[in-house]
Image (cartoon, grey):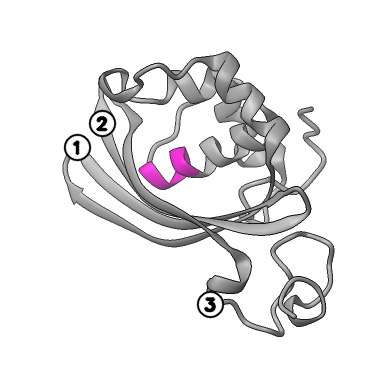
Amino acid sequence: MLDSEVLCYCSSGRLFQDCCQPFLTRSCIPKTAEQLMRSRFSAFCVGNGEYLVNTHHPETLGGLTAEKLSNASDEWRWTRLDVLYHNVTGATQSEVAFNAWYLEKEQLMCHSEVSTFVLLDNEWKYQKGNFENRAAKDVKYGRNDPCPCGQGKKYKKCHGH
């Protein structure tokens, strides 16, 4: 569901219609690797596998299909994105480190990744990522911060106990 009157799924604090929605509808393209990474997170949230395939470098796509990527949102409910850093490593390459929080069978998990993006035909493409999935309790997170599950409670009163 693409509800443009909600805050963006990528945790930017902006409205979806002013943040990632234009990328997902392809009315404009991300100008930076971080914008692409944020929009890909939003695509996972809404099950837009076509966008994920179109923004993936064709040489590293492997057997991934739009259908497989769309169905991945049925298994996990993505709840929050924390961008740790965006590092431009060359004129046509960039990396973005992030924690993507999700619920899997009501257990809060964290997907930590450093992604490599490359500029191909004037568009940023996801090339590869080094990642690990960990239980929330294994990730350093402030006890008084809002819980990344999105329920509005402090982490220590929600999934941090």
Q: Is residue 32 above or below residue 101?
A: above
Q: Nearer the viewer, residue 161 or 129?
A: 161
Tell me the mark number nearer the camera, choosing from 3 and 2.
3
Magenta-tinted stretch: 33-37
**Disc 2 to disc 1, how far (Cα)?**
5 Å
User: Could you tell me which residue is drawn at 46 percent across and 20 percent down?
Assistant: 53
Q: Amino acid at mark 1?
A: Thr
Residue 48 shows in this picture: no
- Residue indicated by mark 2: 119
Residue 60 at what x, y percent from top left? Answer: 29, 25
Q: Are marks 1 and 3 in contact (CB under 8 Å)?
A: no
* Residue behind mark 1: 92
Q: Residues within 10 Å of mark 2 (few under 14, many from 20)?
A: some
> Image height check: is 147 above or below 52?
below
Q: Which residue is mark 3?
A: 140
* Secondary structure mostly seen in the magenta stretch: helix
